Image (spheres, grey):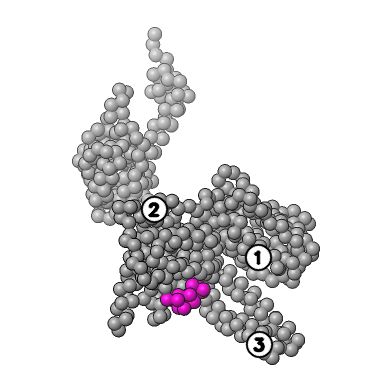
Amino acid sequence: MPATTSNSPAGNDPFISDGVAPERALALVKAVALQNAILTSATFSIIATDEAGIIQLFNIGAERMLGYAADEVVNRISPSDIHDPQEVKERAEALTLELGTIIAPGFEALAFKASRGIEDIYELTYICKDGSRFPAIVSITALRDDARNIIGYLLIGADNSARKRVESELKKAMAVAEQANRAKSDFLSSMSHELRTPLNAILGFAQLLETGAPAPTPTQKRNIEQILKAGWYLLELINEVLDLALIESGRLTLSNEPVSLAEVITECRAMIEPQARSRGIGMTFPQFPVPRFITADRTRVKQVLINLLFNAVKYNRPQGSVVVEAAAVSNSTIRISVRDTGIGLPPEHIDQLFQPFNRLGKEASAEEGSGIGLVVTKRLVDLMGGTIGVVSTLGQGSVFWVEFRTASAPQFSTQPAYPESTARPKVPEGTPLRTLLYVEDNPANLELVGQLIGRRADLNMLSAADGTLGIEYARACLPEVILMDINLPGMSGIEAMQILRADPVTAHIPIIALSANAVPRDIEKALEAGFFNYITKPIKVSEFMDALDVALAFSRKTSGNASHV
Protein backbone atom coordinates (compact mmCIF):
# COMPACT_ATOMS: atom_id res chain seq x y z
CA MET A 1 0.00 0.00 0.00
CA PRO A 2 1.44 3.43 -0.91
CA ALA A 3 2.51 5.73 1.97
CA THR A 4 -0.06 8.32 2.94
CA THR A 5 0.95 11.94 2.54
CA SER A 6 -0.38 14.98 4.30
CA ASN A 7 -0.39 18.69 3.60
CA SER A 8 -0.06 19.52 7.33
CA PRO A 9 3.32 20.74 8.66
CA ALA A 10 3.60 17.54 10.63
CA GLY A 11 3.46 15.64 7.47
CA ASN A 12 7.19 16.16 7.01
CA ASP A 13 8.07 15.33 10.65
CA PRO A 14 10.31 12.26 10.59
CA PHE A 15 8.99 11.07 13.99
CA ILE A 16 5.40 11.04 12.68
CA SER A 17 6.33 9.64 9.31
CA ASP A 18 8.02 6.77 11.22
CA GLY A 19 4.80 6.14 13.09
CA VAL A 20 5.69 7.96 16.37
CA ALA A 21 2.73 9.55 18.16
CA PRO A 22 2.69 13.39 18.19
CA GLU A 23 2.82 13.53 22.04
CA ARG A 24 5.90 11.37 22.18
CA ALA A 25 7.49 13.28 19.36
CA LEU A 26 7.03 16.53 21.26
CA ALA A 27 8.54 14.97 24.40
CA LEU A 28 11.56 13.82 22.42
CA VAL A 29 12.05 17.28 20.95
CA LYS A 30 11.92 18.78 24.44
CA ALA A 31 14.39 16.21 25.75
CA VAL A 32 16.85 16.97 22.97
CA ALA A 33 16.43 20.71 23.60
CA LEU A 34 16.99 20.20 27.35
CA GLN A 35 20.11 18.13 26.69
CA ASN A 36 21.46 20.80 24.36
CA ALA A 37 20.69 23.52 26.96
CA ILE A 38 22.62 21.59 29.61
CA LEU A 39 25.58 20.99 27.37
CA THR A 40 25.69 24.61 26.24
CA SER A 41 25.13 26.07 29.74
CA ALA A 42 27.62 28.77 30.62
CA THR A 43 26.92 28.40 34.36
CA PHE A 44 28.39 24.94 34.94
CA SER A 45 31.44 23.26 33.52
CA ILE A 46 30.50 19.83 32.19
CA ILE A 47 33.40 17.52 31.38
CA ALA A 48 33.01 13.90 30.32
CA THR A 49 35.93 11.47 30.03
CA ASP A 50 36.46 7.96 28.78
CA GLU A 51 37.20 5.10 31.19
CA ALA A 52 40.90 6.07 31.23
CA GLY A 53 40.12 9.63 32.28
CA ILE A 54 40.84 11.38 28.95
CA ILE A 55 38.45 14.25 28.22
CA GLN A 56 35.82 13.44 25.55
CA LEU A 57 33.34 16.30 26.10
CA PHE A 58 34.05 19.88 27.16
CA ASN A 59 30.98 22.10 27.20
CA ILE A 60 30.64 25.87 26.69
CA GLY A 61 30.56 26.44 30.47
CA ALA A 62 33.91 24.67 30.82
CA GLU A 63 35.31 26.74 27.95
CA ARG A 64 34.12 29.97 29.56
CA MET A 65 35.39 29.10 33.03
CA LEU A 66 38.74 27.62 32.07
CA GLY A 67 39.63 29.51 28.87
CA TYR A 68 40.34 26.41 26.78
CA ALA A 69 38.54 25.61 23.53
CA ALA A 70 37.09 22.13 23.43
CA ASP A 71 39.42 20.98 20.63
CA GLU A 72 42.42 21.95 22.81
CA VAL A 73 41.55 19.40 25.50
CA VAL A 74 39.34 16.68 23.97
CA ASN A 75 41.36 13.47 23.46
CA ARG A 76 44.42 15.34 24.78
CA ILE A 77 44.39 15.77 28.57
CA SER A 78 42.76 14.56 31.79
CA PRO A 79 40.70 16.77 34.15
CA SER A 80 43.45 16.27 36.76
CA ASP A 81 45.77 18.24 34.46
CA ILE A 82 43.70 21.41 35.02
CA HIS A 83 43.47 20.97 38.81
CA ASP A 84 46.03 22.33 41.28
CA PRO A 85 48.65 19.48 41.33
CA GLN A 86 49.49 19.98 45.02
CA GLU A 87 45.82 19.71 45.99
CA VAL A 88 45.42 16.58 43.85
CA LYS A 89 48.45 15.08 45.61
CA GLU A 90 47.04 15.95 49.04
CA ARG A 91 43.67 14.42 48.08
CA ALA A 92 45.43 11.21 47.01
CA GLU A 93 47.27 11.05 50.36
CA ALA A 94 44.07 11.73 52.34
CA LEU A 95 42.12 9.05 50.45
CA THR A 96 44.99 6.58 50.92
CA LEU A 97 44.69 7.05 54.68
CA GLU A 98 40.88 7.06 54.65
CA LEU A 99 40.36 4.00 52.47
CA GLY A 100 43.44 1.99 53.40
CA THR A 101 44.64 1.51 49.83
CA ILE A 102 47.34 3.31 47.85
CA ILE A 103 45.85 5.92 45.50
CA ALA A 104 48.10 7.64 43.01
CA PRO A 105 47.97 11.38 42.47
CA GLY A 106 46.33 12.23 39.15
CA PHE A 107 42.95 11.28 37.74
CA GLU A 108 42.72 8.24 40.05
CA ALA A 109 42.61 10.61 43.03
CA LEU A 110 39.62 12.38 41.46
CA ALA A 111 37.69 9.32 40.28
CA PHE A 112 38.52 6.58 42.81
CA LYS A 113 35.40 6.96 44.98
CA ALA A 114 33.11 7.36 41.95
CA SER A 115 34.59 4.21 40.43
CA ARG A 116 33.56 2.33 43.58
CA GLY A 117 29.99 3.67 43.42
CA ILE A 118 30.59 6.16 46.25
CA GLU A 119 28.93 9.54 45.81
CA ASP A 120 31.70 12.15 45.66
CA ILE A 121 31.71 15.93 45.68
CA TYR A 122 35.06 17.58 46.21
CA GLU A 123 36.41 21.13 46.40
CA LEU A 124 39.65 21.82 44.55
CA THR A 125 41.23 24.67 42.62
CA TYR A 126 40.91 24.84 38.85
CA ILE A 127 43.83 26.34 36.88
CA CYS A 128 42.79 28.26 33.74
CA LYS A 129 44.62 28.44 30.43
CA ASP A 130 45.98 31.92 31.31
CA GLY A 131 47.30 30.65 34.65
CA SER A 132 44.58 32.23 36.78
CA ARG A 133 42.94 30.09 39.43
CA PHE A 134 39.55 29.77 41.09
CA PRO A 135 38.02 27.43 43.70
CA ALA A 136 35.46 25.00 42.30
CA ILE A 137 33.02 22.48 43.71
CA VAL A 138 33.00 19.39 41.48
CA SER A 139 30.60 16.45 41.47
CA ILE A 140 32.01 13.34 39.79
CA THR A 141 29.97 10.31 38.70
CA ALA A 142 30.95 7.09 36.96
CA LEU A 143 29.16 6.46 33.61
CA ARG A 144 28.25 2.81 32.98
CA ASP A 145 26.88 0.77 30.09
CA ASP A 146 24.00 -1.67 30.29
CA ALA A 147 26.33 -4.33 31.68
CA ARG A 148 27.36 -1.95 34.49
CA ASN A 149 30.87 -1.59 33.10
CA ILE A 150 32.47 1.85 33.50
CA ILE A 151 32.70 3.61 30.15
CA GLY A 152 33.68 7.06 31.46
CA TYR A 153 33.19 9.76 34.07
CA LEU A 154 31.08 12.93 34.25
CA LEU A 155 32.43 15.95 36.14
CA ILE A 156 30.07 18.87 36.80
CA GLY A 157 31.79 21.90 38.33
CA ALA A 158 30.70 25.29 39.64
CA ASP A 159 32.77 28.37 40.42
CA ASN A 160 32.96 28.67 44.23
CA SER A 161 34.70 32.05 44.35
CA ALA A 162 31.62 34.00 45.49
CA ARG A 163 30.94 31.64 48.41
CA LYS A 164 34.61 31.72 49.37
CA ARG A 165 34.55 35.51 49.42
CA VAL A 166 31.43 35.52 51.58
CA GLU A 167 33.02 32.97 53.95
CA SER A 168 36.20 35.04 54.15
CA GLU A 169 34.26 38.24 54.85
CA LEU A 170 32.15 36.42 57.45
CA LYS A 171 35.27 35.09 59.18
CA LYS A 172 36.77 38.58 59.22
CA ALA A 173 33.55 40.04 60.62
CA MET A 174 33.39 37.33 63.29
CA ALA A 175 37.03 37.93 64.22
CA VAL A 176 36.39 41.67 64.53
CA ALA A 177 33.27 41.02 66.63
CA GLU A 178 35.14 38.55 68.84
CA GLN A 179 37.99 41.00 69.28
CA ALA A 180 35.53 43.76 70.19
CA ASN A 181 33.81 41.44 72.66
CA ARG A 182 37.14 40.52 74.25
CA ALA A 183 38.09 44.20 74.44
CA LYS A 184 34.77 44.96 76.13
CA SER A 185 35.21 42.13 78.61
CA ASP A 186 38.83 43.11 79.29
CA PHE A 187 37.73 46.71 79.86
CA LEU A 188 34.97 45.67 82.26
CA SER A 189 37.35 43.37 84.10
CA SER A 190 40.03 46.05 84.37
CA MET A 191 37.58 48.73 85.45
CA SER A 192 35.99 46.44 88.03
CA HIS A 193 39.38 45.79 89.61
CA GLU A 194 40.25 49.49 89.52
CA LEU A 195 36.95 50.42 91.19
CA ARG A 196 37.45 47.93 94.01
CA THR A 197 40.60 49.71 95.22
CA PRO A 198 39.01 53.09 96.13
CA LEU A 199 35.84 51.32 97.26
CA ASN A 200 37.91 49.31 99.73
CA ALA A 201 39.08 52.59 101.29
CA ILE A 202 35.54 54.01 101.37
CA LEU A 203 34.09 50.96 103.12
CA GLY A 204 37.11 50.52 105.39
CA PHE A 205 37.17 54.09 106.71
CA ALA A 206 33.36 54.18 107.00
CA GLN A 207 33.52 51.12 109.26
CA LEU A 208 36.28 52.78 111.31
CA LEU A 209 34.04 55.83 111.78
CA GLU A 210 31.10 53.60 112.72
CA THR A 211 33.04 51.81 115.47
CA GLY A 212 35.42 54.60 116.47
CA ALA A 213 35.67 56.59 119.69
CA PRO A 214 34.01 58.81 120.48
CA ALA A 215 30.93 57.12 119.10
CA PRO A 216 29.26 58.97 116.22
CA THR A 217 26.21 61.08 116.93
CA PRO A 218 22.82 59.69 115.84
CA THR A 219 22.89 61.88 112.72
CA GLN A 220 26.43 60.82 111.90
CA LYS A 221 25.51 57.18 112.50
CA ARG A 222 22.61 57.42 110.00
CA ASN A 223 24.92 59.05 107.45
CA ILE A 224 27.55 56.35 107.92
CA GLU A 225 24.90 53.64 107.53
CA GLN A 226 23.88 55.18 104.21
CA ILE A 227 27.52 55.27 103.05
CA LEU A 228 28.00 51.62 104.00
CA LYS A 229 24.72 50.51 102.45
CA ALA A 230 25.53 52.23 99.15
CA GLY A 231 29.14 51.00 99.28
CA TRP A 232 28.25 47.37 99.85
CA TYR A 233 25.66 47.55 97.07
CA LEU A 234 28.25 49.07 94.73
CA LEU A 235 30.69 46.28 95.64
CA GLU A 236 28.01 43.69 94.82
CA LEU A 237 27.41 45.35 91.45
CA ILE A 238 31.15 45.47 90.68
CA ASN A 239 31.51 41.78 91.55
CA GLU A 240 28.61 40.87 89.25
CA VAL A 241 30.03 42.90 86.37
CA LEU A 242 33.45 41.30 86.93
CA ASP A 243 31.95 37.80 86.95
CA LEU A 244 30.03 38.49 83.76
CA ALA A 245 33.17 39.87 82.09
CA LEU A 246 35.19 36.81 83.12
CA ILE A 247 32.52 34.43 81.83
CA GLU A 248 32.12 36.22 78.49
CA SER A 249 35.88 36.42 77.95
CA GLY A 250 36.25 32.69 78.68
CA ARG A 251 38.72 33.33 81.51
CA LEU A 252 36.59 32.00 84.36
CA THR A 253 38.00 28.68 85.57
CA LEU A 254 35.94 26.14 87.48
CA SER A 255 36.82 23.06 89.52
CA ASN A 256 33.88 20.68 89.20
CA GLU A 257 34.20 18.16 92.01
CA PRO A 258 31.97 16.39 94.58
CA VAL A 259 30.29 19.05 96.73
CA SER A 260 28.22 18.24 99.82
CA LEU A 261 24.72 19.70 99.46
CA ALA A 262 24.18 19.76 103.20
CA GLU A 263 27.37 21.78 103.79
CA VAL A 264 26.68 24.27 100.99
CA ILE A 265 23.05 24.83 101.94
CA THR A 266 23.99 25.25 105.61
CA GLU A 267 26.53 27.92 104.69
CA CYS A 268 24.01 29.69 102.43
CA ARG A 269 21.40 29.53 105.18
CA ALA A 270 23.75 31.24 107.64
CA MET A 271 24.23 34.10 105.18
CA ILE A 272 20.59 34.59 104.10
CA GLU A 273 18.50 33.82 107.19
CA PRO A 274 19.39 37.04 109.09
CA GLN A 275 18.22 39.13 106.11
CA ALA A 276 15.01 37.10 105.90
CA ARG A 277 14.29 37.59 109.62
CA SER A 278 14.79 41.35 109.31
CA ARG A 279 12.06 41.40 106.65
CA GLY A 280 9.73 39.01 108.46
CA ILE A 281 10.26 36.25 105.89
CA GLY A 282 10.10 32.66 107.13
CA MET A 283 12.55 30.16 105.67
CA THR A 284 12.46 26.37 105.46
CA PHE A 285 15.46 24.27 104.44
CA PRO A 286 15.76 20.56 103.59
CA GLN A 287 17.28 17.97 105.86
CA PHE A 288 19.79 15.43 104.58
CA PRO A 289 19.64 12.22 106.65
CA VAL A 290 21.85 10.65 103.97
CA PRO A 291 24.76 12.72 102.61
CA ARG A 292 24.11 13.95 99.07
CA PHE A 293 26.84 15.20 96.73
CA ILE A 294 26.63 17.05 93.43
CA THR A 295 29.25 17.69 90.74
CA ALA A 296 29.92 21.43 90.84
CA ASP A 297 32.42 24.14 91.72
CA ARG A 298 31.88 24.71 95.44
CA THR A 299 32.43 28.47 95.38
CA ARG A 300 30.26 29.04 92.33
CA VAL A 301 27.40 26.78 93.39
CA LYS A 302 27.23 28.77 96.64
CA GLN A 303 27.10 31.96 94.56
CA VAL A 304 24.22 30.52 92.51
CA LEU A 305 22.18 29.44 95.54
CA ILE A 306 22.80 32.66 97.47
CA ASN A 307 21.62 34.72 94.50
CA LEU A 308 18.42 32.67 94.15
CA LEU A 309 17.78 32.83 97.92
CA PHE A 310 18.50 36.55 98.11
CA ASN A 311 16.08 37.25 95.24
CA ALA A 312 13.43 35.08 96.90
CA VAL A 313 13.73 37.20 100.06
CA LYS A 314 14.10 40.57 98.30
CA TYR A 315 11.09 40.21 96.01
CA ASN A 316 8.83 38.44 98.51
CA ARG A 317 5.71 39.88 100.13
CA PRO A 318 5.78 41.04 103.80
CA GLN A 319 5.53 38.09 106.22
CA GLY A 320 5.98 35.75 103.26
CA SER A 321 7.95 32.53 103.13
CA VAL A 322 10.77 30.84 101.24
CA VAL A 323 10.98 27.06 100.97
CA VAL A 324 14.14 25.32 99.79
CA GLU A 325 13.76 21.74 98.56
CA ALA A 326 16.17 19.14 97.22
CA ALA A 327 14.92 16.06 95.39
CA ALA A 328 16.30 13.54 92.94
CA VAL A 329 14.79 13.80 89.45
CA SER A 330 16.70 10.74 88.21
CA ASN A 331 19.44 8.39 89.35
CA SER A 332 22.03 10.89 88.14
CA THR A 333 20.42 14.30 88.72
CA ILE A 334 19.23 16.26 91.72
CA ARG A 335 17.07 19.39 91.67
CA ILE A 336 17.35 22.22 94.23
CA SER A 337 14.24 24.43 94.25
CA VAL A 338 13.73 27.85 95.86
CA ARG A 339 10.00 28.60 96.27
CA ASP A 340 8.79 32.08 97.30
CA THR A 341 5.43 33.72 97.97
CA GLY A 342 6.16 36.88 96.00
CA ILE A 343 4.01 38.54 93.37
CA GLY A 344 5.10 36.15 90.63
CA LEU A 345 5.87 36.93 87.01
CA PRO A 346 3.65 37.22 83.92
CA PRO A 347 4.49 34.79 81.08
CA GLU A 348 5.98 37.52 78.88
CA HIS A 349 8.61 38.25 81.55
CA ILE A 350 9.81 34.65 81.91
CA ASP A 351 11.72 34.71 78.60
CA GLN A 352 13.43 37.98 79.58
CA LEU A 353 14.64 36.82 83.00
CA PHE A 354 18.17 35.96 81.92
CA GLN A 355 18.87 39.08 79.83
CA PRO A 356 21.59 41.44 81.16
CA PHE A 357 20.44 44.65 82.87
CA ASN A 358 16.76 43.74 82.43
CA ARG A 359 14.93 44.33 85.71
CA LEU A 360 11.52 43.46 84.25
CA GLY A 361 9.91 46.78 85.13
CA LYS A 362 11.37 46.90 88.67
CA GLU A 363 13.59 49.90 87.83
CA ALA A 364 11.33 52.26 89.78
CA SER A 365 10.83 49.92 92.75
CA ALA A 366 12.36 50.44 96.17
CA GLU A 367 14.53 47.33 95.75
CA GLU A 368 17.98 47.95 94.35
CA GLY A 369 19.32 45.73 91.63
CA SER A 370 21.36 45.67 88.45
CA GLY A 371 19.64 42.96 86.43
CA ILE A 372 22.94 41.07 86.15
CA GLY A 373 22.59 38.54 88.96
CA LEU A 374 20.35 36.02 87.17
CA VAL A 375 22.42 36.29 83.99
CA VAL A 376 25.58 35.39 85.91
CA THR A 377 23.67 32.65 87.74
CA LYS A 378 22.48 31.01 84.53
CA ARG A 379 25.88 31.15 82.88
CA LEU A 380 27.59 29.69 85.95
CA VAL A 381 25.06 26.86 86.05
CA ASP A 382 25.64 26.19 82.34
CA LEU A 383 29.43 26.14 82.84
CA MET A 384 29.04 23.61 85.65
CA GLY A 385 27.02 21.33 83.36
CA GLY A 386 23.73 22.02 85.13
CA THR A 387 20.39 23.48 84.08
CA ILE A 388 18.25 26.27 85.53
CA GLY A 389 14.57 27.07 85.15
CA VAL A 390 11.64 28.88 86.67
CA VAL A 391 7.91 28.31 87.13
CA SER A 392 5.92 31.38 88.16
CA THR A 393 2.27 32.16 88.82
CA LEU A 394 1.23 35.80 88.84
CA GLY A 395 0.01 36.77 92.30
CA GLN A 396 1.17 33.54 93.95
CA GLY A 397 4.95 33.37 93.68
CA SER A 398 7.80 31.73 91.79
CA VAL A 399 9.92 28.59 91.96
CA PHE A 400 13.47 28.89 90.68
CA TRP A 401 15.28 25.59 90.34
CA VAL A 402 18.71 24.31 89.39
CA GLU A 403 19.71 20.76 88.53
CA PHE A 404 23.17 19.24 88.87
CA ARG A 405 24.64 15.82 88.28
CA THR A 406 24.90 13.71 91.41
CA ALA A 407 28.33 12.58 92.60
CA SER A 408 29.72 9.97 94.93
CA ALA A 409 31.20 11.04 98.23
CA PRO A 410 34.90 11.94 97.96
CA GLN A 411 37.01 8.89 98.68
CA PHE A 412 40.64 7.95 98.68
CA SER A 413 42.40 4.65 98.66
CA THR A 414 42.75 2.84 101.99
CA GLN A 415 45.95 1.26 100.70
CA PRO A 416 49.17 2.36 102.39
CA ALA A 417 50.58 5.60 101.07
CA TYR A 418 53.67 3.73 99.92
CA PRO A 419 54.24 0.05 99.12
CA GLU A 420 56.23 -1.73 101.81
CA SER A 421 59.10 -2.26 99.38
CA THR A 422 59.48 1.48 98.99
CA ALA A 423 58.55 2.55 102.53
CA ARG A 424 59.92 5.91 103.61
CA PRO A 425 62.61 5.81 106.28
CA LYS A 426 61.48 6.77 109.76
CA VAL A 427 62.09 10.35 110.77
CA PRO A 428 64.97 10.51 113.25
CA GLU A 429 63.98 11.48 116.77
CA GLY A 430 64.35 15.16 117.45
CA THR A 431 63.69 16.14 113.83
CA PRO A 432 61.52 19.27 113.93
CA LEU A 433 58.11 19.09 112.30
CA ARG A 434 57.76 21.01 109.11
CA THR A 435 54.60 22.96 108.33
CA LEU A 436 52.32 22.58 105.34
CA LEU A 437 49.62 25.18 104.69
CA TYR A 438 46.52 24.05 102.75
CA VAL A 439 44.31 26.85 101.37
CA GLU A 440 40.94 25.23 100.56
CA ASP A 441 37.26 26.06 101.20
CA ASN A 442 35.86 22.54 100.70
CA PRO A 443 35.62 20.69 104.06
CA ALA A 444 35.67 17.27 102.37
CA ASN A 445 38.94 18.09 100.62
CA LEU A 446 40.39 19.48 103.84
CA GLU A 447 39.47 16.26 105.63
CA LEU A 448 40.99 14.12 102.88
CA VAL A 449 44.31 15.97 102.76
CA GLY A 450 44.34 16.20 106.57
CA GLN A 451 44.19 12.41 106.81
CA LEU A 452 46.91 12.03 104.20
CA ILE A 453 49.19 14.48 106.01
CA GLY A 454 48.35 12.61 109.24
CA ARG A 455 50.27 9.66 107.80
CA ARG A 456 53.42 11.75 107.69
CA ALA A 457 55.41 11.91 110.91
CA ASP A 458 57.40 14.87 109.58
CA LEU A 459 54.55 17.23 108.72
CA ASN A 460 52.03 19.42 110.49
CA MET A 461 49.13 20.92 108.53
CA LEU A 462 47.54 24.36 108.84
CA SER A 463 44.45 25.26 106.81
CA ALA A 464 42.85 28.47 105.57
CA ALA A 465 39.42 28.73 103.94
CA ASP A 466 40.18 31.54 101.49
CA GLY A 467 43.06 33.28 99.73
CA THR A 468 43.19 36.33 102.00
CA LEU A 469 43.48 34.22 105.15
CA GLY A 470 45.96 31.94 103.40
CA ILE A 471 48.24 34.91 102.66
CA GLU A 472 48.07 36.01 106.32
CA TYR A 473 48.93 32.50 107.56
CA ALA A 474 51.78 32.15 105.07
CA ARG A 475 53.35 35.44 106.17
CA ALA A 476 52.91 34.69 109.85
CA CYS A 477 53.93 31.00 109.90
CA LEU A 478 56.28 30.72 106.89
CA PRO A 479 55.34 27.10 106.03
CA GLU A 480 57.76 24.93 104.11
CA VAL A 481 55.12 24.09 101.46
CA ILE A 482 51.75 25.56 100.47
CA LEU A 483 48.92 23.62 98.82
CA MET A 484 46.55 26.05 97.04
CA ASP A 485 43.11 25.41 95.59
CA ILE A 486 42.54 27.42 92.39
CA ASN A 487 38.89 28.37 92.77
CA LEU A 488 38.58 30.04 96.16
CA PRO A 489 35.88 32.43 97.38
CA GLY A 490 36.82 36.05 96.74
CA MET A 491 40.45 35.97 95.72
CA SER A 492 41.42 33.12 93.38
CA GLY A 493 44.26 30.73 94.17
CA ILE A 494 46.28 32.16 91.27
CA GLU A 495 45.95 35.70 92.65
CA ALA A 496 46.94 34.55 96.15
CA MET A 497 49.94 32.66 94.75
CA GLN A 498 51.12 35.70 92.81
CA ILE A 499 50.88 37.92 95.90
CA LEU A 500 52.97 35.44 97.90
CA ARG A 501 55.52 35.13 95.08
CA ALA A 502 55.85 38.92 94.93
CA ASP A 503 56.49 39.21 98.67
CA PRO A 504 60.21 38.77 99.55
CA VAL A 505 59.19 37.13 102.85
CA THR A 506 57.24 34.31 101.17
CA ALA A 507 58.68 34.25 97.63
CA HIS A 508 60.86 31.20 98.36
CA ILE A 509 57.99 28.93 99.48
CA PRO A 510 57.00 26.33 96.84
CA ILE A 511 53.26 26.56 96.15
CA ILE A 512 51.50 23.53 94.68
CA ALA A 513 48.17 23.98 92.90
CA LEU A 514 45.57 21.39 93.90
CA SER A 515 42.56 21.55 91.58
CA ALA A 516 39.87 19.45 89.91
CA ASN A 517 40.55 21.29 86.66
CA ALA A 518 42.60 18.87 84.56
CA VAL A 519 42.53 20.72 81.20
CA PRO A 520 46.15 20.62 79.92
CA ARG A 521 46.21 24.25 78.77
CA ASP A 522 44.92 25.46 82.17
CA ILE A 523 47.62 23.41 83.90
CA GLU A 524 50.27 24.97 81.64
CA LYS A 525 48.94 28.46 82.36
CA ALA A 526 49.00 27.81 86.11
CA LEU A 527 52.59 26.61 85.98
CA GLU A 528 53.56 29.55 83.79
CA ALA A 529 51.92 31.87 86.32
CA GLY A 530 54.30 30.65 89.03
CA PHE A 531 53.03 27.47 90.72
CA PHE A 532 55.77 25.04 91.71
CA ASN A 533 53.66 22.03 90.73
CA TYR A 534 50.07 21.14 89.81
CA ILE A 535 48.15 18.19 91.26
CA THR A 536 44.72 17.29 89.87
CA LYS A 537 41.80 15.92 91.85
CA PRO A 538 40.88 13.19 92.55
CA ILE A 539 44.20 12.77 94.32
CA LYS A 540 46.46 9.81 93.57
CA VAL A 541 48.11 9.22 96.92
CA SER A 542 51.53 8.12 95.69
CA GLU A 543 51.79 11.04 93.25
CA PHE A 544 50.62 13.43 95.95
CA MET A 545 53.27 12.24 98.41
CA ASP A 546 55.99 12.31 95.76
CA ALA A 547 55.07 15.90 94.87
CA LEU A 548 55.27 16.87 98.55
CA ASP A 549 58.73 15.29 98.86
CA VAL A 550 60.02 17.20 95.84
CA ALA A 551 58.61 20.47 97.18
CA LEU A 552 60.03 19.83 100.66
CA ALA A 553 63.46 19.07 99.21
CA PHE A 554 63.30 22.31 97.24
CA SER A 555 62.22 24.20 100.35
CA ARG A 556 65.09 22.72 102.36
CA LYS A 557 67.57 23.71 99.67
CA THR A 558 66.30 27.29 99.32
CA SER A 559 66.17 27.70 103.11
CA GLY A 560 69.77 26.49 103.31
CA ASN A 561 70.89 28.95 100.65
CA ALA A 562 69.08 31.75 102.45
CA SER A 563 70.86 30.92 105.72
CA HIS A 564 74.27 31.45 104.06
CA VAL A 565 73.37 34.85 102.64
Q: Of the residues shown, which amino acid type is indicated by label 1?
A: Ala
The amino acid type found where label 3 is placed reads: Gly
Q: Residue furthest front?
A: 429
Decide if residue 390 is on the left or right side of residue 540. right
Task: Examine the rendering and report whether any part of residue 398 can be seen.
Answer: yes
* Residue positioned 38% across, 66% down in the render: 458
Where residue 81 sits: x, y (%)?
23, 45
Q: Which quarter of the image is occupied by the N terminus? A: top left
- Based on the picture, tell me whether residue 112 belongs to the magenta stretch: no
Nearer the viewer's eye, disc 2 or disc 3? 2
**Residue that appears at 24% across and 33% down:** 51
Among the two numbered marks 1 and 3 on one chain, the one whose residue lies closer to the N terminus: 3
The secondary element bearing badge 2 is classed as loop
Q: Amino acid at mark 2?
A: Pro
Residue range in magenta is 467-478
Q: Secondary structure at mark 3?
A: loop
Residue lying at the far bottom in this picture: please name it. Answer: 214
Q: What residue sits right under mark 3 in the picture? A: 212
